[in-house]
Amino acid sequence: MNTLSSSSVGENAILVINCGSSSVKFSLIQPETGLALLSGLAECLLTEQAKIKIKLNNEQYKETLPSPFDHQAALTVLVKHLHQFNLVNSISAVGHRVVHGGEKYAEPALISEDVESAIESLAKLAPLHNPANLIGIKACQKAFSDLSQVAIFDTAFHQTMPAKAFLYGLPYELYKEHGVRRYGFHGTSHYFVAKQAAQQLNKPLSQCNLISAHLGNGCSVTAIKNGESVDTSLGMTPVEGLMMGTRSGDVDAGIIFHLVEQLGYSVNDVDQLLNKKSGLLGVSQLSNDCRTLEEAMLNGDTQAELALTVFCYRIAKYIASFSASLTELDGLIFTGGIGENSSWVRAKVVEQLALLNFHLSEEENQKARFGKSGNIAASNSRNCWVIATNEEWVIAEQTHNLLSSTQPIKTEV
Ligand code: ADP
């Protein structure tokens, strides 16, 4: 049996849980170093194909989940394995990724009944995500009843945005009475890469001015002034801004009336169209996956090339627009699956940013792939980094910090 001894692991590892509607991603992280002792994914939940994969010491364990195939079943199997791997005693707390914290949470929160109610009431702003996050919280409370649980909100980092950036040009009462405003997402990722860039610059984050581009299946660009988010491309929901894998990003709102009134779309049809059928998938008519599209483009598929070209132009346009949010700029950061791996996308984006004095070193750009970070700027350019994001580490670190400052980490049953 593959085990790690508690003495080698220590006793303050954080179990990080990211619960989606049909999946649970988990990892056990040492908060000081970010080392993942164990990681895995339960997917296809609520179907008979529900399964769990757990990685420990480069070995992978796979198992189908028992009925009722739900989040609780996944966590029960995880706990069984944590016992078998001799890791249960090393867990000091559980940190949960929670997508929407609204205006209420600019910081991590120790989960209490009040916090749970707030997450529930914020579900009206994130109907697909917050209920799933709550299911994870409740399942973990059952599975780890003696451990403190902490919520880390994806929106929190963006709570520093000024009103000029977060307000839409809509009647003000929609904001005051119904919370209609820009919140932004991917906050833990933008924060993590900004901190890493600050290390590269050898100055405190509070003195850094950056633009970060998180390019994965979901995509966003954030302007960071003196270490704080001052604008971001995702909005009240994760459809605004850049073109994404299957999401449209910005469209003329009038298109929605046209779809409904002239083409007979229902509200649900529009929702599906903008969230699931647009973006790289919609334009290429082939795939939402950047790798597949790059391969197709190299084989002469002009529609794939068009999709990637629109995608990159939108990114460059957003980055350039954020020069209005900053008075200084220390550099640009690429992160997320595409940002970390696609030298083609990075080159195409930066090619359109020459006016802002960004130019890439072709050699460094080619080298920075598959987990290899680095500064890919040419010698006559502003800094341009590829930085692998690590949201799990932020969640572990912030969970650990919150509990260290408020109470003993482990409570006795
Ligand atoms: P998520 O938002 O689901 O976390 P990721 O950050 O993992 O997504 O990013 C997924 C995207 O990264 C996909 O479009 C995938 O094709 C792209 N990607 C991963 N590796 C490469 C690569 N080597 N070259 C180009 N794109 C890549």
Image (cartoon, helix red, strand yellow):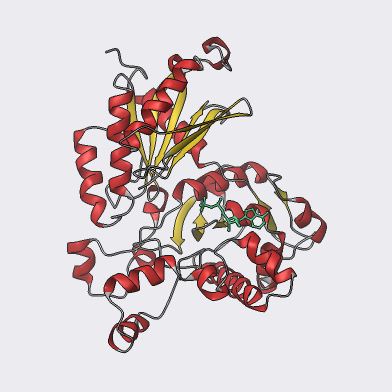
Image quadrant occupied by the C terminus: top left
- Locate residue 126, reporting x and y percent: 30, 55
Instruction: Looking at this view, name the residue that lies furthest to the right.
Output: 363
Quick check: 204 left or right of 299? left
Instruction: Looking at this view, name the residue that lies furthest to the front.
Output: 48
Residue depicted at x 22% and y 75%: 171
Quadrant of the image occupied by residue 184: bottom left
Q: Is residue 25 visible?
A: no
Residue depicted at x 75% and y 62%: 360
Image quadrant occupied by the N terminus: top right
Pick whichever, 136 or 240, lies toward us: 136
Q: Is residue 9 above or below residue 18?
A: above
Q: Quadrant of ligand 1?
A: bottom right
Residue depicted at x 71% and y 50%: 369
Pick whichever, 148 or 354, lies toward us: 148
Quick check: 168 left or right of 318? left
Quick check: 120 left or right of 281? left
- Locate residue 372, reporting x and y percent: 71, 45
